[in-house]
């Protein structure tokens, strides 16, 4: 099982275009 952050990182590696619109909304914790 991946943590939500690990899952997002994995998906971003595979499909970065999915997150380009608002990466800060897709990746909570990025600003911590």
Image (cartoon, helix red, strand yellow):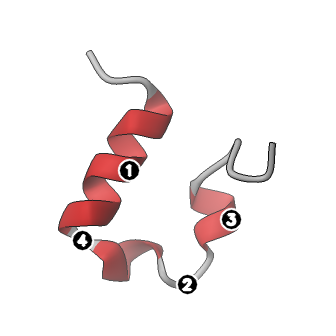
Image point (39%, 36%), residue name: 6
Image point (34%, 39%), residue name: 7
- Please identify the quarter of the rendering in which residue 25 is found: bottom right
Task: Give the percent coordinates (x, y) of residue 27.
Answer: 59, 53
The Cα–Cα distance between marks 4 and 2, rounded to whole angstroms, is: 12 Å
Residue that carries the numbered disc 3 in the rendered image:
24
Q: Is residue 26 left or right of residue 30?
A: left
On residue 9, which mark appears?
1
The Cα–Cα distance between marks 1 and 2, rounded to whole angstroms, is: 15 Å
Q: Is residue 12 above or below residue 16?
A: above
Tell me the SS state at disc 2.
Answer: loop
Q: Is residue 30 left or right of residue 15?
A: right
Residue at the outermost right position: 32
The Cα–Cα distance between marks 3 and 2, rounded to whole angstroms, is: 9 Å
Task: Give the percent coordinates (x, y) of residue 2.
Answer: 32, 23
Q: Quadrant of the N terminus?
A: top left
The Cα–Cα distance between marks 4 and 3, rounded to whole angstroms, is: 16 Å
Q: Are marks 4 and 2 in contact (CB under 8 Å)?
A: no
Tell me the SS state at disc 3.
Answer: helix
Image point (62%, 76%), residue name: 22
Say whether disc 1 or disc 2 marks the residue closer to the N-terminus.
Answer: 1
Say whether disc 4 or disc 3 marks the residue closer to the N-terminus.
Answer: 4
For label 1, count other residues whose C-alpha is less than 10 Å away and answer few (under 14), some (14-19) or many (20+). some
Residue that carries the numbered disc 4 in the rendered image:
15
């Amino acid at each position: 099982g991946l943590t939500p952050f690990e899952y997002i990182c994995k998906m971003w590696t595979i499909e970065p275009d999915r997150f380009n619109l608002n990466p800060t909304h897709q990746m909570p914790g990025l600003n911590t």
